[in-house]
Image: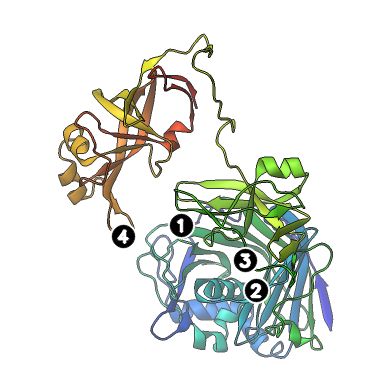
Amino acid sequence: MAMVCASGVFDPRGERAMRARDLFCCGHRHRSSRRREIRGFCAAAARILVPVEECIERMRDALGIENVEGECADKFITMTGKQWFMDMKGDYKFTWCADGRFHERFKGEHFTVEWAHDGRNTWYADFAGRVTKLQLDSLELCLLTAWIRNGYWLTAEGQEKLSIKHRTDAGDLPVAVNPRMQILDVVASVVVDSVSFLPSRLVAKVCGEIESWGYSDWQTLEPECKCQVPLSVAHVTSSGSIDSIFVSCSKVGSNEDSSVFVLPSSRFLPRDGVYPHAEFDAGVSPNVKLFGCESGHCLVRPLVDGQDIGYFLLDTGASGLMIDANKTRELGMEGFGEVHLLGVETRVRSRFVRGKQFQIGGLKIVNPIYIETSMSVSKGLLCVFDPASYVPSSNLQWQEMILLDNLPYVPAKINGHQVLLLLDTGAGGADVILHARAAREYFPGIDERLQCGSVKESSSGGGGLVAGTGEIQTLEFGGFVFEKLEALFLRYKVGNLDVSQYTAGLLCGRLLKTCLIVLDYQNSRFGLLSWK
């Protein structure tokens, strides 16, 4: 067994501007053949084409792939170091073989996670030790990100599973990717340096958004396996956060335990320290009271750290437990790491928190990990006053508010046109929504503009709402002027959005949550104190 230790300087973002000598390769999985494919091109930004066969051979030479297939064919390569993962620092370990098998692990203070491929199965074990067999795009991305780092994609065996082809539409873009990521059709692009012929960046779509992996500090494993590996890797997520790997030591050996790659027969792997795990009390009825509300949501009342802190939404669309930030402070929960929540309208940065136990019916989760979120906006405050005794701020200027069926409508000007808009904190997706009649009146030619593509058109999943997405230059409202707002222009009459000849549409929650608004329902007036 031989061991080599190395270190180097690394740009953690891994996003250097593309130089004219950079090449590209693009990879994806072919749906009909059910084979993972790397479809690629080797084309410089200046459109200097390198024959794909020559490109592959030069990459193989640069990476020392012949040594991987020869001297290292029966070896285990283990790379260790440090990793920043979800804003947590921990130990990193990546063990792989020339035949494509690998095992990758992050072990931090708060939790451990791991990924592996045993030649047939690709699997993931989360912070609770729960083992999941990866499928679809999760499977494809796991394989691609590992195989490009260890060079397996360029081995003879790897090329039987992958194909590398020219990508002629690269132009002079820094990256080139397929505009869509379909199920069983993951698309990835590899930027290859045209001088060293070493990969410098992988770009792929993850959940429909572009993410990248930057590779640097390439070093040779010596003396038993003369192949090049990157000692520094930076994964830049679509949210802008960075997960970085810094390899400090690599070893090559023949006597490693290959069971580390194998899909575990148990559904759970053991975890060190404090980790979430479930306990069931068979003596407790499995029936749990479920509360329904008019919005269609289902609510439950669990015990959190032994206390009834209120209702929880029962949401199969959520990836884990979530809890209000105010409650975590009340309960003294420990916070750590960073996670980004992607909603319908926007992305929110949050963190993990750890509780003592979460109990609902006979199920008890010990040491649960929640994602902390806010159930309020701005200052997190809804103030309810008696209108008879309310003393407004000295700079508050009351404006007329019209109630139609107890709904508050307020006067406003859109690009100079006087309109009446509903204050609707429950509407989302834009700053302003105009119904079809108002859109045609205040934006002449909107239908033609939609047809020619100058305004984007979108529809709901069920096809019931067809709208154009455009921009409102100015909106005057409550004594303030808002500029360049995103608007939805409805193309047809929809439901109750056009309930009066005098109204034009909605002021939506996305805009309203940036404002401090006083609503005086009793006196049919409102005031806008500030906006950000």
Q: Nearer the viewer, mark 4 or mark 2?
A: 4
Q: What kind of residue is marked 4?
A: Gly
**Residue 207, position as x, y percentages in the image:** 49, 62
At mark 2, the secondary structure is strand
Q: Which residue is mark 4?
A: 462
Distance from Cα at disc 3 to Cα at disc 1: 56 Å
> Image quarter for residue 525?
top left
The residue closer to the viewer here, 62 or 428, is 428
**Residue 145, position as x, y percentages in the image:** 58, 71
The reply to whether the C-beta atoms of the residues labelled 1 and 2 are less than 8 Å apart is no
Distance from Cα at disc 3 to Cα at disc 2: 32 Å
The residue closer to the viewer here, 140 or 155, is 140
Q: Earlier in the sequence, mark 4 or mark 3?
A: 3
At mark 3, the secondary structure is loop
Q: Earlier in the sequence, mark 4 or mark 2?
A: 2
**Residue 396, position as x, y percentages in the image:** 47, 13
Q: Which residue is mark 1?
A: 174
Q: Which residue is mark 3?
A: 287
Q: What kind of residue is marked 3?
A: Asn
